[in-house]
Amino acid sequence: MQNIGEVNPDNNGCFSPPDPREHWAMITMVKSWTVNAVNRQAIRETWGSITRIEGVNLEMCFLLARPKNAALQGELKKENEKYGDILQIDIEETTDHFTARSVAGMNWIVKNIPANFLFSSCDDNMVLNLDNFIMSITETVKRQKPASKACMISDVFPFICVFSFRRSDPPSRDVNNPWSITSELYPPDVLPAHCQGGFYTTSVSTIRLIIAKATVTRVMALDAVWLTGILRQKAGMDANSVNAAHAIDYPGELVRYVEKDIPSAMRKYWEGFSKKKICTCTV
């Protein structure tokens, strides 16, 4: 919070592009499990270590819930005393609470981060190519028109699916699939356009509109579908308000998903990115 500035004084749901538009700011909320301390450390040492590049200010926090184990809570407290980058939500750490954790984290973001910040949500097994990501997101910021006084839905900053954009997937009804959706919870045969949860970006002002609908909507375990698809629609945002990020050559140029030996893979991919340029731009 010392780096970010004052508590958000005004957020009416509309995004005001910065001037110059290439100099935007963003906070990334990395969703993590308590036991994944090595993943968090790898992020801190790689793409999470960059706080400024070519006029863009970057902040980051790790979002966690409350572990059942008191020893793990003690380790987490020590970790935060050292790095000061952990946002812990007072709900039990279970898969059933994934969505509640995300909403609680977003609620904190809306109350504490300036409305003209961009907001990204990502998992703790993603490696971001900052050079390409900044180039891609800047294109969207440049196209964003100044918000009107009436704050129309067309003024709202869109959801940008950096990891994966899904336009019209059918919901899984397989009872053996932990990510299935019952027809009682979601009757339609097609899900609304949405981002998958690996990494997506929007603005703090847009998140305000989304979580306003969260308190009056039945929770779904698929947090990214629920937030970027269902709640986005309930907020009045049309199909053009969610889209795939502009890729340099292909989506993997912006972010990489790693599954095995995550800390080592993160460092390996990071070395392969244009690190020299990033380092020369960091202050």
Image (cartoon, helix red, strand yellow):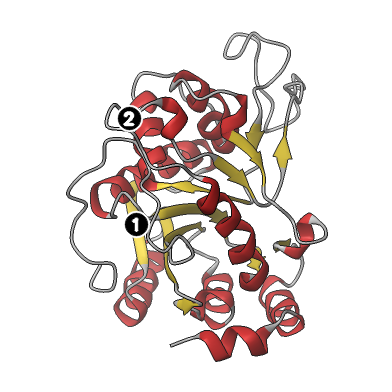
Q: Indicate the position of residue 205 as horizontal and vertical percent values.
A: 36, 42
Q: Is residue 137 left or right of residue 169?
A: left
**Residue at image coords 34%, 73%:** 80
Q: Which residue is mark 2?
A: 151
Which residue does the image show at 64% across and 51% down from the upper left?
A: 198
On the image, the x and y values in percent for residue 266 come to 69, 75
- How far across and down, in percent of the image, does residue 222 sit? 59, 33
Classed neighbour count for the residue bearing mark 1: other residues with Cα under 10 Å, few (<14), some (14–19), many (≥20): some
Q: Is residue 81 left or right of residue 264?
A: left
- Residue 207: where, in percent of width, then height? 40, 40
Residue 187 visible, this orientation: yes
The residue located at (75%, 62%) in the rendering is: 259
Q: Is residue 217 above or below residue 275?
A: above
> Regarding mark 1 in the picture, which secondary structure is present there?
strand
Q: Which residue is label 1 attached to?
A: 88
In the displayed structure, would residue 167 be above or below residue 146? above
Of the numbered discs 2 and 1, the one sitting upstream in the chain is 1
In which image quadrant can residue 272 be found? bottom right
